[in-house]
Structures are given as structure tokens and as C-alpha cells.
Amino acid sequence: MEYEAVIGLEIHVELLTESKMFCDSTTRFGEEPNTQVCPVCLGMPGTLPVINKKAIEQTVKTGLALNCDIALFSQFHRKNYFYPDMPKNYQISQYDLPLASGGYVEVEMEEEGYTTTVGITRVHLEEDTGKLVHVGGAGRIAGAEYSLVDFNRAGVPLMEIVTEPDMRIPVEAKAFAQKLRAIIQSLGVSDVSMEKGSMRLDVNCSVRPKGVEEFGVKTEIKNLNSFRSLERGLAYEIKRQIEAVEAGEEIVQETRHWDETTGRTSTLRTKEYAHDYRYFPDPDLVPMELDPAWIEEITSTLPELPDERRRRFMEEYGLPSHDATLLTATKASADFYEEAVSLGANAKNVSNWMIVELASYLNAENLEIDECAVTPRHIAELVKMIDAGTISGKIAKDIFGEMFETGKLPSIIVEERGLIQISDESEIAAIVEAVIEENPKSVEDYRGGKQQALGFLVGQVMRLTKGRANPALVNKLLKEKLS
Amino acid sequence: MAISIKDVEHIAWLARLALTHEEKEKFAGQLSNILEHAGKISELNLKNVAPTSHAVPVSNVFRDDVSGPCLEQDEALANAPKREDGGFVVPKIVGEPAAM
Ligand SMILES: [Zn+2]
């Protein structure tokens, strides 16, 4: 039987505010434990939380960018649970009255050649929890003797985005998550870094026979710390569920933990995490009745979003859809591209060098575009040097590694290594003649109609000039002399 | 609405409370009484009354995103029964709670 998966995502995003969600403690990252705290975020009796307006604005902004309806009446609830990552034994969150709901995101599946729409169920705001360090038991929660709590992150504004179960294959989930990241980057409301934990993914997944309407029993996968984990974890879980169903086993609704090293998901001991949160409206926080004029104002300040930017790249720079999608996949890459083009380099050529050469170096080193030594100025200069005939494309490829490694400008590397292209016709002509003289067999072959022989002769000229000869000139001169 | 011993046990477990059998029986009765008392409200016709979470007609209490002074680590940990490396020490999380 053929099966299909049904996938939904829950994404948590830490907002970029100066102070916490309900108190004026700072949100700085990486400070000494329990130094970014105050009586409010330590849950001391008698303290009163007050809502950070900036966090509301950022959530509304995100809701609008995700095509949601913004709630004119919204409220915070207490989510009660006993777990030492919160000092109050509850987390302030939102329940039945989230700030935004009913949106959608369009996701281009560029390699697969279609566009899919993912519904956004809701966007709500809550407070982040503290950090636990487990002592004993090799630092894992199971087997630990005790744990240490650091409340520096407790109370940092945390936005939760929940999707409809609209995705069917792992790569759609990955593409959606990347698109969402790009949207939030363009809004500037979070640094959405999977590595730093300011963007976290939880996934719901079930399988059903193809053609069946009804959903299967779903499991939740946690600990997906990268887009790669998301795709791999889902692929594993879907396969596991299909095999279980085919073997006549029942799928148990549970939370499963993804292990990146073993490449498997396993049951989390769920007994300890009873999902009985007894939500109730937080009596400390009065409701929010947002002014439609304020929402209108936020709407008018929305920046250019990735979809619009992608369309503009196609129109303004004449890029194919494939290039435009890749370049606008992150805000940093789109900014990089536009800066390089603004320095006077050919738009399509900049795109090519970014999505082929630069992308493969970044991939190999596992770096983001704004973390490497290559800047828009490097790419612009490189492209301009090729277009001006100063260096060949081949030389440009040769020096790319050094440029990536050292951050030296291409003009400097070319000069240091003496790689400037030979475009002097008489200089090349002399070498061409020498090559013709030394290779009578190939010359004969070519004259006899064997086109490949020309390639060999070109290669010989390039070898003698260490790749510096202008290839177009070499071709032209060889053909002239041989005809 | 009567609260059973089983309900009391569940609530006690959620709140990490260890109760004796006598306490469970006592609380089952007390909790039932409280619910019964609150249940009187359902005798009223409330069809046209919106759910009210706050008795005072106030909304939109916001603060600007400005940070202020934080506590020193020593102050933050002053009430902690135990501390280590600047953190609050809490007992084993996974496994049977010691108090039960
Ligand atoms: Zn605080």
C-alpha cells in the first residue's frame, strides 16, 4: 500500500527586545548565570508582570507578514506545570485568544518545481523558560543526580507559530521552515538562529494510506536542532511509522526525541510531562484590546518580504526563478547580492558566482554567508575582472579558495600570483604557432574533421600559459591558423 | 459535582503533593463542596454574558521596552536552599520524586 505523511510544525522564536516580556531585566545572551534577573522573572511573591509593548508589536508584525488576522481582543493565560525551568510553576502563555491566527505562507519547492501553501493556525506570545544543567548521569536528564537552574532566559519574549498539518514530505517542512526564517529575518524581530536556539522546531507527524481523509495517530518529534535534522528526523519517523502500521502495530501518541548521531527517534519518558496544564486567564495581566489604527500603522511599516523581494529580483535583475529563490532564501544572502550588484557587477554573473562557487564553499565549511571572509566587494570585483577579460573564469575559480580562506581581494591575489590574463594577440599567436608545430598529429586530425582535436590544442596553449591565455582569443587564433 | 479519591490523587500528583489516605478523603469532600458552591452560578441564565476573566474594566496595560537594573547573582540566589556554580540546585527531575 502507498502511504503519505501528514506534517505540522510548531516553531518557537525568541524576539529581539532589550528587556524581557513582563519585566525590565535585560535579555543579553551569554552572561553569568542568574545575573539577568529581577524579582518578577524569579517569580517572587508580590511582584507584578507588565506587558512589553514592543513584543506585542513584533508579534503583530509577524502575524501580518504571515497573512494572519490580528485579534482585536487578546489575553494571557497561565500554563501550569511542575518543572524547574520556571520559577513560578507556570509559564505565562496564550491559550484560546492568541494575538494572530488564520494565516498562510507560500513555499516555492524550487527543485521539485511546484509551490505549496502552508496554513498558519496561530501566532502567540509567551515567556521563555530558564536553562537547566544536569549534574551526574553524563549530563542527561535521565540519570542526573540533581540539576542547576539559570533563570537568565526565563521571561524573554518567545513567539510560537503553529502551522496547519499541510506538509506531506520532509523537504516541504524544511522549505517552509527556511521560508519562515527568511520572513522573520526581513522583519528584524528575531535573529532566528537555530544554532543559538533563538529558533526551535517541534514537529508533529502521522501517516495514512494515500487517498484516505482521516488522520493517523501523530507523534511529536523534539530536538531538531538544524534544518538538516528536521528533514532527517522526519524521514526516519515517517519510515518508522509506515513499518509499524504495515506490521499491524498501533502508533502511540507520544513525544519522541531525535538523536542526530544515531539518526533515530526514540520515546521520551512522557509520564513526567503530564499534559494537564490547567490553563486559566492570568489575573495579573489585563486583556489587550488592540487599536485597529495601531495595527494599520504596523501594516504600513512592514518591510519588503522575501516573496516580494524574490519577484523584484526576477524583474529588476532579470534573474530566473531558481536564482531568485536561492538568493532570497536568507536576508543576509539577498542583501549580499544587492550590494555586489550595486558595486557595478553584472547581475546574472554575480548570481552565478554566489549560488555555485560561494555556496559550495559555504556548504563545505558549514558557514552562513555573513560569517565568511568573502564580501560583496570580493564577488563584485571578481565578476568585473572576468567581464573585463583581466582573468578567465578558470583563473577566477582557482583563486576562489584563497579568497575565501584569507579574505584577500581578487585583484591582490591575481597580482601576487601573476595571473593576469594574456589578451595580447601577438603574444598568444606566438604560443599558438608553437603548439601547432609541436602537435602535427592533432593538426592533421582537426583538418580531417575531428573537432575534438581543437580542444586538445586549446588545452596545450592553456597549459603553456598556466591558464592565463584569453580562451576566446586562443580559439579564434587557432581556427584562423588551421584553416 | 463530586470529586473522587482518584481525582484528588491526580491533582496531588500534578502539584507534587504527597497525601495520606485520610487527607485524600478530607480533600475530596472539601473540593466537592467548593465546586458545588461555585456550581450555583450555573443556576443563573448567563446566555448573554460574555466570559469575564477580570472584574475590573481595564485593558492595555503596557510598558516600553526599556531595561533596568538586574539583581546581583548573590542577591538572586539569596533564598536558594542550595546553590552551585551560580545556579539554583534542584532535586532530580526525572524519576520518582523523593517527596512521594
Ligand atoms: Zn526580571
Image: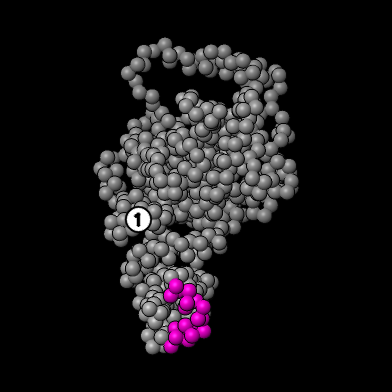
Q: Residue furthest front?
A: A448
Q: Nearer the viewer, residue A305 or A329?
A: A329
Give the magenta-colored segment's residue range: A430-448
Question: As displayed, is residue A102 above or below residue A305?
Answer: above
Figure disc tally: 1
User: Identity of the amino acid at label 1?
Assistant: Pro
Residue A157, x across and y down, in percent: 46, 46
Q: Nearer the viewer, residue A405 or B48?
A: A405
In terms of secondary structure, where does tag 1 sit? loop
Residue A77, x across and y down, in percent: 46, 34
Q: Nearer the viewer, residue B61 or A468?
A: A468
Residue A395, x across and y down, in percent: 47, 75
Q: Nearer the viewer, residue A473 or A210?
A: A473
Residue A438 belongs to magenta span: yes
* Chain ID of residue with mark 1: A
Question: In the image, what residue occupies the spot 43% across and 75% down?
Answer: A447
The reply to whether residue B69 is in sight is: yes
Mark 1 sits on what residue? A320
Q: Is residue A433 left or right of residue A68?
A: right
**Quarter in which the C terminus of chain B is drawn:** top right
Q: Main secondary structure of the magenta part?
A: helix
